[in-house]
Image (cartoon, grey):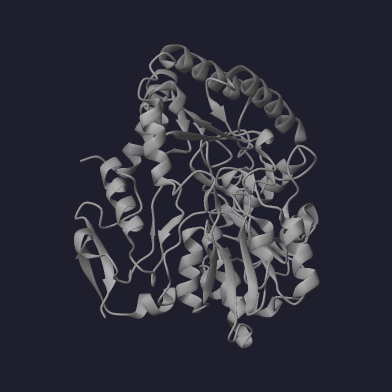
Amino acid sequence: MDSLRKGLDDYCGQGMVSFHTPGHKGSKELLSGIMFPDYDLTELPGLDMLHHPHGIIAKAQKKAAEAYGSEETFFLINGGTAGNQSMFAALMAGMRLTDRKVRIDRRAHRSVFGALILSGVVPEYIAPIIHPDFHLALGMDAVEYSDDLAGIGALHLTSPSYYGTVTDLKTIIKQRDGNAPFIPILVDQAHGSHLQGGLFPAGAVVEGADLVLHSSHKTLAALTQAGMLHVQGSRVDRTALKKSLEFLQTSSPSYLLMASLETALEGLTQTQIWQDLYVEVCLLHQKLEGPLRILTGKDSGKYGIYDVDWSKILINVSGLGLTAFEAVDFLRKVFQIEPELWDKENILFMLGAGSRPEDVRHLTKALEYLVGKYRGLAGQQKERRTDQSQNSAGSGSTLLIPPMHLTPREAWLAAKRPVKLKDALGLISGETISIYPPGIPLIAGGEEITSYVLEYLNRAREYNWQGWDGSERGEILAVNI
């Protein structure tokens, strides 16, 4: 019988070129300073304690705060999930949010919806804007998001998005400061740990957000599951935040993960590799824009996109007359290229601290070959675009959010039953379903099961998209009424 280790060995032996997380890309050079198994230790004399640091961990966290410009930084060893959950738990401490909602960017990670269940916070969702060329929720109207803050106790924003699109945080902070200066702004910047220096959009800490989450492992040389939570200002109770991190993270923190965060910080100062990668990405754009639709800085200022992180390479292949799945299958088998994700017509390639200029050149060569091979086979292009446009609820429109009848926590605690999709119209969902890719909640627990939701779920079954436990059975959990 195959073992987990054999599966890992087999995959590593394929020699795939990584355009996915983690950011170190398996670089032994980047991780050479982390000695395994030597560093796999517990909280011994002289090694400090994560939840009550006064020694080497405290110093490492202080270095992180200085690197990013925050007042204080906490290491996360339970991933960004623990960071999001701790944010919400801290908000509820002392009944701070009594009778107030948290406004949430609907593109939020599933850990945010878990945080809503754990904390009991009442959400107010703001729909993102769907880009008409990619049919993806890439933008957010910053004015709409920060308008009319009556009854709002906090703002939670996801920026950059999975695809590298950045929201206009300056406008949001300006609106907040003018209308409700007591409201904290929480930013899930899981995909933006590398946003430092002039090559990239400004990070949320520099912009002035109160709490900023980094999943450092996604783009830097940190081990998977390692992240940081940056804090500034007094809008969030710092003691409550520390206590929340303590009870939501393991009591046996990994020194391997913490040491890798220190390694990741050292990489922030090594800007030449990012400069070299930037040059190669610009060349890729020049050679392939046209036959492929590529998300670039030219998309800034449209459809709620304030800026674009060039290290995320998002391409649309529908102009070639083949699906993204077919393109990925070709790229994997012929060029050993492993993307981060794909849907029906888009493919996302991610760069990180371990990426090399030759990797981007290899990707450019592979995409040029793909274009040359399939460009003349676009007979079904119009049909595919029309079908996908229906998936996205219209070009340039906002994502459709079902009506909410119960909070996520109320739906979680309620009695539920599995219901066939054909019988589910109008019922209240007892689960949050985030179809992958890209993981944006189609429906959250407590929301009404609409015809749009059912249509999308049936399409997800057809294309075998992930993120829904009831897919094979064609069922959804509904709240008993």
- Up the image or down, 111 lies above or below 437; here it is below
Q: What residue is at 31 percent from the left and 52 percent from the top?
A: 455
Instruction: Judge left or right: residue 454 versus residue 287.
Output: left
Is residue 242 visible in this depiction of the protein? yes
- Up the image or down, 95 lies above or below 35; here it is below
Is residue 46 visible in this depiction of the protein? no
Q: Residue 150 in the image: x percent, y percent?
A: 66, 78
Q: What residue is at 35 percent from the left and 56 percent from the top?
A: 452
- Up the image or down, 475 lies above or below 334; here it is below
| Frontmost residue, 64 versus 97 | 97
Instruction: Judge left or right: residue 93 versus residue 445.
Output: right
Q: Quadrant of the C terminus?
A: bottom left
Q: Residue 356 in the image: x percent, y percent?
A: 62, 27
Q: Residue 143 in the image: x percent, y percent?
A: 69, 60
Q: What residue is at 40 percent from the left and 20 percent from the top?
A: 378
Q: Quadrant of the N terminus?
A: top left
